[in-house]
Amino acid sequence: MICFDENHNGGFTLAAQFSLASVLFSHALNKPADICDRSKAGKKVVKWLWGSLEPPHNLRKNRELHYMRLKLLLPAVNPAKFEPPRKCSRLGCPGMRFIPRQEVSKKIVDAQHAEVTAWRYECVKCGCTFRVYPEGVSEKQISKRVNGMAVMLYLLGLSYGAVEIVLGSLGMGIGKTSVYRGVQSVAEQVPGMRREKLLGEYKTKAVGADVTSVRCNGQWVTIGIAVDAINGMVLSIDHLPGEDAEQLKAWLEPILEAVDADVLVTDDADALKKVSDETGRSQQVCKSHVGRNTDALVDELSAIIVTGQDHSLEAVGITPEQALDDLAALKSMIHSRCPEDQSQLEEISLRYANARKPGNGKKHDVAYRMRNLFIDRWNLWPRLTFYHTWKDENDNLILDGTNNHCERAIGWWIKERYRSMHGYKREQSALGISRLIAFAGNHLARGLSLAALMA
């Protein structure tokens, strides 16, 4: 659901709580658009303009759903507000004194103003003349407010052509090439969000990291995302050459050093465990990932034991009843995650230590699989239960034991916009758009001013 509210600066505030598969507009449109768009989003917009597409109802019927939210502040256009020139437009001229020479009119594409007034100034030093435009207007014909609306609609899932249709129907004629240039220009101005240049002097004691992939020009591109594991703020979105330990270390180590982090929160990937060990950081492995994987394995192994299909446990002197009790105990411990249970896990794993690996080409039997499962969870236990031992001065847990902040950031800031397209054309576009949406997500409380990202 999208709501437009005029703010105190004359611009608009976008408060969006939505699924990008459905976009609603509160503006009443009096006529259908004459332009066709072959994209999926474009077809939906055309149907909406023709009145044949009903808006979805009860978007919040399931209150447990967590919709993506963005708050964007559109640039204001104020024809009466001018910023006095501070330097000459001629390259290399040191002039700082300027004389107003002429008031000229300028036609613009805007939601409220068809024409504004600009001033021509002359530099006393070199005699160069140049124009000064009112707030929200530049040398371009399209106002910053309309460019901001184009960026906003694109971020909500519309294609460049669909944005052209919507704005044209609202009386703001703008081509899809201009939409593309506006979106890319704003994305390039997003500060930080890169491994080489993070957000100022930001510090945190825990960093969450994960890896995903998007399709760019027919090829899958690996993208790494790092967040503040305590509050969810996105720190960096970067292209990665691969997902092995050395490549992940080269990506994460500068980030960990820059924010002075002591803890790395990740999933159960072995490469990320190696990064934690080699960088000297404590690690919290996501309890949700481990819990789901363990439950699935326990259920599968229990079913095999109950049916009596496998007799490998007899070779290590363990009865089916004992094996089922051990699996049930593991399942219980995985969900309670008490640090002191590690000794019990060690005791259970020793029962299966003599299980031998089947020969080459043979399927792993139940005894060997249980041996590997118990040894793995025993070794993983300090990383899985770390959050129980890391507390603040008031004895409160600092982490919740999950990597949900990273998972949510991937879903909202990278995948949500990506799902409505067949893939990006350029790798830089994938990174730029993801960083822009994540940057807006970081400013959800006060809203992101798009004027600050427009040159």
Image (spheres, rainbow, N blue to C red):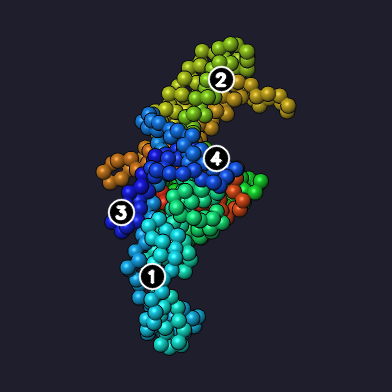
- Mark nearer the N terminus (4 vs 3): 3
Residue projecting furthest to the right: 361
Mark 2 crowd level (few <14, some 14–19, many ≥20, 10 Å Cα)? some
Residue projecting furthest to the bottom: 125
Identify residue for label 1.
117
SS at mark 2 in the image: helix
Q: Where residue 340 sits: x, y (%)? A: 39, 31
Q: Nearer the viewer, residue 154 or 408?
A: 154
- Distance from the alpha carbon under mark 3 to that under mark 2: 60 Å
Tell whether label 4 touches label 2 (CB within 8 Å): no
Callout 1, which amino acid?
Thr
- Mark nearer the N terminus (3 vs 2): 3
Residue projecting furthest to the top: 307
- Mark nearer the N terminus (1 vs 2): 1
- Distance from the alpha carbon under mark 3 to that under mark 1: 23 Å
Q: Which mark is residue 18?
A: none
SS at mark 4 in the image: helix
Identify residue for label 4.
43
Tell whether label 2 touches label 1 (CB within 8 Å): no
Identify residue for label 3.
7
SS at mark 1 in the image: strand
Which tag is nearer the camera, tag 4 or tag 3? 4
Residue 322 visible within the image: yes
Q: Which mark is residue 301?
A: 2
What's the residue at 52%, 29% (across, down)? Answer: 293
Q: Is residue 318 left or right of residue 110?
A: right
